[in-house]
Each structure stands twice: as C-alpha cells, then as structure tokens.
Amino acid sequence: MRVSANRFAEQADEALADEKLQSALASASQRMCEQRERAFAQFPPGEALRDRAQWIKRQTLAELDRHLERLSSRVEARGGVVHWAADARQACEIVLEIVRRRGGRRVVKGKSMTSEEIGLNDALTAAGIEAVETDLGEYIIQLADETPSHIIVPAIHKTVEDVAALFERKHGETRGADHEALTREARQRLRAKFLSADVGVTGVNFAVAETGSVAIVENEGNIRLSSSLPGCHIALMGMEKVIPDLSALSVFLRILARSATGQKMSSYVSLVTGPRRDDEEDGPEEFHLVILDNGRSRLLADPVLGEALGCIRCGACLNVCPVYRHAGGHAYGWVYPGPIGSVIDPSLLGHEQARPLPFASSLCGACRDVCPVRIDLPRLLRGQRDNVVAQRAAPLAALAARAYREMMSRPSLYRLAFRTVYWLSRPLVPLGLISWLPGLRGWTRYRDLPLPARESFRARWLRRRG
C-alpha cells in the first residue's frame, strides 16, 4: 500500500504542470457536476431526502455498536460468517486465510475502496495469489500499476488515447482510440478470469442490519459476476456502512447515484443475503463479511470529526473542489482524495503521515453544498487543522495564525502592521507586484500578490466620514 500523503505540495506541483492531466480533470469533473445538478433539479424530493439521509446517518452512528451487533447476528442466521478486523493487517490476514483454506489461486475483485485502503492486492500478490480488478476503471489502473485517482471514477485522469496505448502495450495488439472497442476488449479478457476464479471480493455500499443483507451498486455488472460466479464471496466493509433497515436503504439509493454520476439509479443494485440456498440456481457456497475498524472508532469518538463517518462515498465533493480539480487524486497520496480524504486520511493514517491534507482546501464550502448527507466538511477540515496544530505538527503555521489573530484584534497594531507592510514592499517591487513572499510561497508561486494599498479601507472610510 503506497502512502505519500505528506508530499502533497510536491505532488500537486507535478499535477499542475501536466497539461494533459489538467484537461482530463477539467472535462470530467465539470461534466459530473453538471449531471448532478440536473439530476437533483429534476427530482423535487431530493433536498428532503438529503435531510432524511443526514438524520439516519447521525442516529445510526450514535448507536453504531447496536446496529453492528444486529447486522452480525442476521448475517450469521442466514448462513454467512462475520469477521471483525481491527486494522488493515488483520483484514488482509482474514482474507488470505479464507482464500488459502479454499486452495484459491485467483481472486476476482469488484470495485472496493476498502480493499484499496487495506492494501489487499499487494497482500494477495505477496502470497502468490492472482488478484484481478474487474471494474473497467480499476482494471485500467491495475494494468498501469497506479492507484485510483477518484472514489467513483478511478481512471478519471486517463484519456481514451492513454487507455488505447496502455492496452496496446499490455495486450500486444494495435487498435484505435475507440471507447466501445476498448471496453469490449477488456470484457473479453475478463470473462475467462471470472469463469476460473476461486474467490470473489467486493466492497459494500450499505449493510442492512434488519435483514443481514449487503447492498452493492454498480454500472457494469462485474460486481455481480464477482459475487455470484466464484464458490466463495468475501464482502469488505468499513463499520460505518451499516444502516438500520430497508426503508433507510431506499433513501440512500435515490441520492447516491444522483450525487455520484447524475443517474436516477445505478444500473445494477444487488442485495446479497448470505450464501446460496438449496433452491437457488446461482450464488456462492460461502459468504464472508469482513467488518473493518482501522481507525474508525477513533474517528467516531471525536465530537467534531465523527460526522465524517456519514460519508457514502459518492465523490461529489471531489468534483466541485477547486483543489482536487487542479491537483487530481494522486496528489493526496492515499486512497481517499479531495475534501473527504483531507478529513478522514489524517485520522486513519495518523497526522504525521497526512499532515498537509487538512490545509489542502480553500474552505469555499462547495463540498458542503453538494454532500448528499450534508456533512459540514469545511468545519471538519478546520477541526483537523486544529488537531495538526495541537500536535505541534505545524508550529510555524500556528505561530503565524496567533500573530495574525493578535494583529486583527488590536486596531493600533493593525494600523502599524499595515503601514509597515506598505512601506517595506515599495522598494522591493519596482513594478508594483510581489512575485514571492515569505510564508506564502505556495500561493505566490503561481500568482502575483498585488502591492497593498497606501491607505486602508478603514482609514479611507473614517476620512470620508469627516
């Protein structure tokens, strides 16, 4: 599992210099924003459902232990096996043990951010087990030996020409840059993998405590093949994915696809309830549900940041975020990019490993406005910044913030600082522009800071009042 969240500034610089990446991000994110806006504009109950979804999530998280226990008992009553993983290492060990017990040599995987979080592919490969990504975007990323760049669209940073060149290099055939032809080629190559797989691994969008079912949504059908063709199905879920009942599921299904891709509903919605029964024609012989903590309990205990566990992983906050739209997902250095990643990554990884991420935001509030469960992401980002400062991970930033607070709370000090900055700037900027400023290098590297006005607004206002 590759983690480089502390290199955000360097990685963002590389992204900003990549013209092809900038074009791909601008086109894809703008398209998804427009699709989401249209979807909710044509759906009058949408805002009320967002309120309802927020309420359900808050109530569920307040009694998370009870809902998880109920889910576990229902899954086991239906013939499934529940495993509890405290961290990523334990989750990988559980999956490896199941695969080895079945003598498995090949695992097909539906799209799962949780499997990315725990580094499952690396663990399977190290154990001599082939892991095959079957989602088209994930398949492309796996061929390219990269990590996903988006929660919903893993290959958002790839153009069709990039994919055509990649397939030619990996598959050994020459072809044109045609979407349908490339999709057909991937489907043909994956079909044999599905038919010969020993174990299927998927993520979980929602786990229904009332019935012991896991709900999985997709647009390609590969997850259904991963969960029903192999003899064993392993579903991975973060513990926050549990919801109380089927009525709650109906709320989330109606806002998830609209928020993520602008669809009324995802093409496929699967409800998996235990292994195949005697009177059923398809489905796995074994069903295993792995419930992952991996820092979520610590996040839940935080009176401010615990709200982040309400996230349903729609990716809408990424699409509207001005930082993500220019830096891309790989700049964040871990599985979850964008505003939601900047909130949860420091708690899951530790602040020392993700120190810059809470500051990778303009706090413009666009992420809060589009969140389907109304998570106040700007407030949570400020909370994470407080944690970074409290742990003395950013002492210079803390000192600067305190100095700024003192200056802004004392009019006489503010006037002195204003005059000082103006007169010190004049001889340094013969053209009237500041191209570099200590402490704001990241800001002034890509834009000029204008010379401060000779007279402050407050001074001008007082003078005009007489």
Image: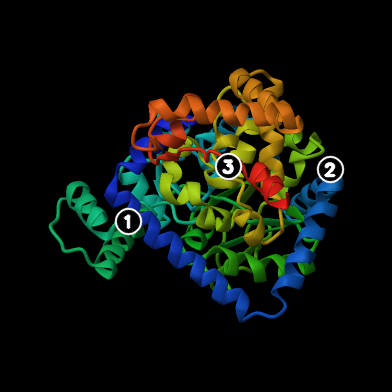
- The numbered mark, 2 or 3, whose residue comes first in the sequence reads 2
Q: Quadrant of residue 409?
A: top right
Where, by quadrant of the figure, is residue 45 drawn?
bottom right
Which mark is in front, 2 or 3? 3
Q: Which residue is under mark 1?
A: 23
Residue in view at x 64 percent, y 26 percent? 416
Residue 42 lies left or right of residue 207; in this view the side is left
Element type where label 2 sits in the image: helix
Residues at badges 2 and 3 in contact (C-beta under 8 Å)?
Answer: no
Spatial CA distance of label 2 from label 1 is: 45 Å
Mark 2, Cα crowd under 10 Å, few <14 / some 14-19 / many 20+, is few
Q: Badge 3: few (under 14), some or many (20 or more) residues near its Cα, within 10 Å? A: many
**Sequence order check, earlier mark of 3 and 1:** 1
Find the distance from the CA under tag 3 to the CA under tag 1.
23 Å
Residue 183 to residue 18: above or below: below
Q: List x then y, in percent, for residue 379.
A: 71, 44
Q: Nearer the viewer, residue 324 or 465?
A: 465
Instruction: Identify residue type, mark 2.
Output: Asp
**What's the amino acid at mark 3?**
Gly
Q: Which residue is mark 2?
A: 65
**Residue at numbered disc 3:** 341
Name the residue type under label 1: Ser
Mark 1 burial class by Cα count in 10 Å: few <14, some 14-19, many 20+:
some
Q: Secondary structure at mark 1?
A: helix
Between marks 2 and 1 in the image, the one whose residue lies nearer the viewer: 1
Mark 2 or mark 1: which comes first in sequence? Answer: 1
Whether residue 318 is visible to the viewer of this picture, yes or no, is yes
In the image, is residue 299 above or below residue 457? above
Q: Secondary structure at mark 3?
A: helix
> In the rendered view, does 458 fall on the left or right side of 1?
right
Mark in the foreground, 3 or 1: 1
